[in-house]
Amino acid sequence: MMMTDLSGYYFRVKETGGTMYRIGDETRHRRVDLEQVAVINTRNGDIRGPGNRPLAPEDQAAAETWLTRRQAILAARQIDDIHRAIDHMNLTAQWVQSQASAEDLDAVTEPLLLAMHDLRTILVRKKADRVEAARKEG
């Protein structure tokens, strides 16, 4: 669940984006009404009303604001995950050097070497592409 400062709306986060609800007034039973307004896809930026009906301008604006904020959060998390992966690689190197048994190393050596080879291949290719693009620009 995700509350935001977008007054009058509630956004339920899901794996591919979120569902946007309008928060209704309290009823006589002191319940809060949630009316589904849109489904928002953070991967492709798609914002759809129920039954593909168009959104009111204020609903569209709120959905777009939430989408922009959510995409920024997800991008920051992705970079943080990469930095954590670097930390894990360093911790793994330390573990291999100081604590791993022969059995431990037998269990992880091949998968680690393949994953590192795959990553290195991609990183080298992307670096070469960036160097070539910079050379052409300059």
Image: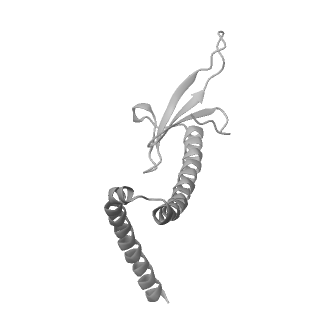
Residue 18, position as x, y percentages in the image: 50, 39
- At 44% from the left and 50% from the top, the residue drawn is 43
The residue lying toward the viewer, choosing from 127 and 120, is: 120
Residue 53 sits in quarter:
top left
Q: Residue furthest front?
A: 102
Look at the picture and state if 68 lies above or below 53: below
Residue 24 falls left or right of residue 94: right
The residue lying toward the viewer, choosing from 94 and 20, is: 94
Residue 90, position as x, y percentages in the image: 52, 65
Residue 60 sits in quarter:
top right
Image quadrant where one finds the N terminus? top right
Look at the picture and state if 110 lies above or below 56: below
Look at the picture and state if 85 lies above or below 66: below
Residue 10, position as x, y percentages in the image: 59, 33
Q: Tally the marks.
A: 0
Tell me which colouring the rendered structure shows.
Answer: one colour
The residue lying toward the viewer, choosing from 47 and 85, is: 85
Residue 17, position as x, y percentages in the image: 47, 42
Residue 16 falls left or right of residue 21: left
- At 44% from the left and 43% from the top, the residue drawn is 16
- At 59% from the left and 49% from the top, the residue drawn is 69
